[in-house]
Image (tube, rainbow, N blue to C red):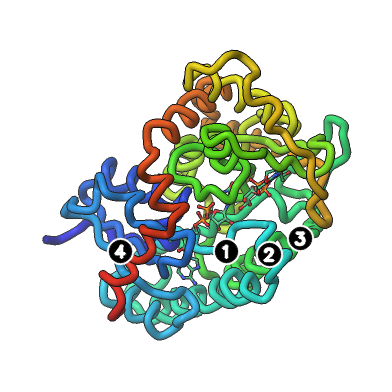
């Protein structure tokens, strides 16, 4: 079968990546979507069960740090677009193990950039029609005070955690490849995503699961830190739009215009989850447990996404209350997914299936 375009999505078995892959596979039958993922603890092909047999979907187990393998894949599939999401993504893990974050996020991105550059420069039409789209985070901008200031595309980088330092470094390499070699590249910096298929080490799925099981809810410090929340399908829609309509060389901020203090978010989560479980209002409030704060915990993130709104017409489509209700409902309805993730069953199944790759 001949495809109009072949597109690699790295990290497609992860949380956001799986939503991006699903969206592209469904909306663009003329494209072949190649999901390239190493299947680390965070990669779960069960996130893509509903589209795994589609004729325009392919999975390749590969490490983005494996330069030769990535070059082979780009070349073999005549890839014209790379949407790069593969990364180590959890701040707490980066505090425990910064080295892995540098390897995957910095060296992995550099290695992928080299592969794309080498193959595309040697292709008959060079960089024409090619795009390297790098998915980054608002955390590279550092932290904001409790006022009305926002991160814009020109806010200077000031990362604090090993995670954000590694993402900032990878962003700089992407820009360097654009500025030095002319590689057509776009970077987007997005705020906190929430929704189905998120690994339950992150606040929202962890807390929903703990409320369901009556376990403590470990709020770091006083819970006054502020995050800007965006429903994951709205992020996937922005990625689709920017991939097709964005200007190479540009950066776009993506955010939910939706700031919440952690403690307020936890109260909302308790209210919705208790209600959906048929428990009396506030039944799970005693589960809130204030624990030692995260080291270097950034106070506040808030994104100004007005450039994306102005230039490409994107705005978040879902109100937070609706997104949260949908999310809680999904985790409660998908207990088996959660059980297989928390028990590690999903890893054994797919690791065995792709053991020879
Ligand atoms: P995730 O941890 O759920 O998924 C990461 C995926 O990358 C997994 O499938 C994993 O197997 C894969 N991976 C890791 N190392 C790899 C390697 N060496 N080679 C190939 N694949 C590898 O992450 P997520 O939350 O979906 O985030 C995806 C991207 O979006 C990341 O780059 C992250 O920095 C960025 N981001 C995330 C958020 C958020 O709120 N989750 C917000 C802004 C930006
Ligand atoms: O801002 C974008 C970033 O959002 C992404 O780049 C990261 O990949 C993603 O993981 C997320 O980072 P955060 O650190 O903001 O997300 P997390 O869900 O880990 O934490 C959200 C907030 O909740 C944060 O202030 C820390 C706090 N927290 C988190 C956990 C896991 C708690 O209070 N208790 C917890 O147990």
Check whether the beta carbons of the residues at disc 2 and disc 3 lie within 8 A of each other.
yes
Q: Which residue is mark 4?
A: 349
**Which numbered mark, 2 or 4, is in the foreground of this view?**
4
In this view of the protein, which residue sits in the foreground, 162 or 284? Answer: 284
Depth-wise, is mark 1 or mark 4 nearer the camera? 4
Secondary element at image label 1: loop
Q: CA distance from mark 1 to mark 3?
A: 13 Å
Alpha carbon of mark 2 to alpha carbon of mark 1: how far? Answer: 8 Å
* Res. 343 in view: yes
Q: Position of residue 265 (x, y in %)?
A: 67, 29
Residue located 24% across and 48% down the image: 51
| Residue located 88% across and 39% down the image | 145
* Residue 254 shows in the view: no
Q: CA distance from mark 2 to mark 3?
A: 7 Å
Q: Which residue is mark 3?
A: 161
Give the residue at mark 2: 94
Q: Quadrant of residue 115?
A: bottom left
> Residue shown at 62%/74% (left/top)?
100
Tell me which numbered mark, 2 or 1, is placed earlier along the sequence.
1
**Between disc 1 and disc 4, whose residue precedes?**
1
The yes-or-no answer for disc 1 within 8 Å of ligand 1 is yes
Does 233 sit above or below residue 12? above
Question: Which quarter of the picture shows residue 57?
Answer: bottom left
Label 1 belongs to which residue?
88
Instruction: State if disc 1 and disc 2 touch (CB < 8 Å).
Output: yes
Which circle, 2 or 3, is nearer the viewer?
2
Which of marks 3 and 4 precedes in the sequence? 3
């Amino acid at each position: 079968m001949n495809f109009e375009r072949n597109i690699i999505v790295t990290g497609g078995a992860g949380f956001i990546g799986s939503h991006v892959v699903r969206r592209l596979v469904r909306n663009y039958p003329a494209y072949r979507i190649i999901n390239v993922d190493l299947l680390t603890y965070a990669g779960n092909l069960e996130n893509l069960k509903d589209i795994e047999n589609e004729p325009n979907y392919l999975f390749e187990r590969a490490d983005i740090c494996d330069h030769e393998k990535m070059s082979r894949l780009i070349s073999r599939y005549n890839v014209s677009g790379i949407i790069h999401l593969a990364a180590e993504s959890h701040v707490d893990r980066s505090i425990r193990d910064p080295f892995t974050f540098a390897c995957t996020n910095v060296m992995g991105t550099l290695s992928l950039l080299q592969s794309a550059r080498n193959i595309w420069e040697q292709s008959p039409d060079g960089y024409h029609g090619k795009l390297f789209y790098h998915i980054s985070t608002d955390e590279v901008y550092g932290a904001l005070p409790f006022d009305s200031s926002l991160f814009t595309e020109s806010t200077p980088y000031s990362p604090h955690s090993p995670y954000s330092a590694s993402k900032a470094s990878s962003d700089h390499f992407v820009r360097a490849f654009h500025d030095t070699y002319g590689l057509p590249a776009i970077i987007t910096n997005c705020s906190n995503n929430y929704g189905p298929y998120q690994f339950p080490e992150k606040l929202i799925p962890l807390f929903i699961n703990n409320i369901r099981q009556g376990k403590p809810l470990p709020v770091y410090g006083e819970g006054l830190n502020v995050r800007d929340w965006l429903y994951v399908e709205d992020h996937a829609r922005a990625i689709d739009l920017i991939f097709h309509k964005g200007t190479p060389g540009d950066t776009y901020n993506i955010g939910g215009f939706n700031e919440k203090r952690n403690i307020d978010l936890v109260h909302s989560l308790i209210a919705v989850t208790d209600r959906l479980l048929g428990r009396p209002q506030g039944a799970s409030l005693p589960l809130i447990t204030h624990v030692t704060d995260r080291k270097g915990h950034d106070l506040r993130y808030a994104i100004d996404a007005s450039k994306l709104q102005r230039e490409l017409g994107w705005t978040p489509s879902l109100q937070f209350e609706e997104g949260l209700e949908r999310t809680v409902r999904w985790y409660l309805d998908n207990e088996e997914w959660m059980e297989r993730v928390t028990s590690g069953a999903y890893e054994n199944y797919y690791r065995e299936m792709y053991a020879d790759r």
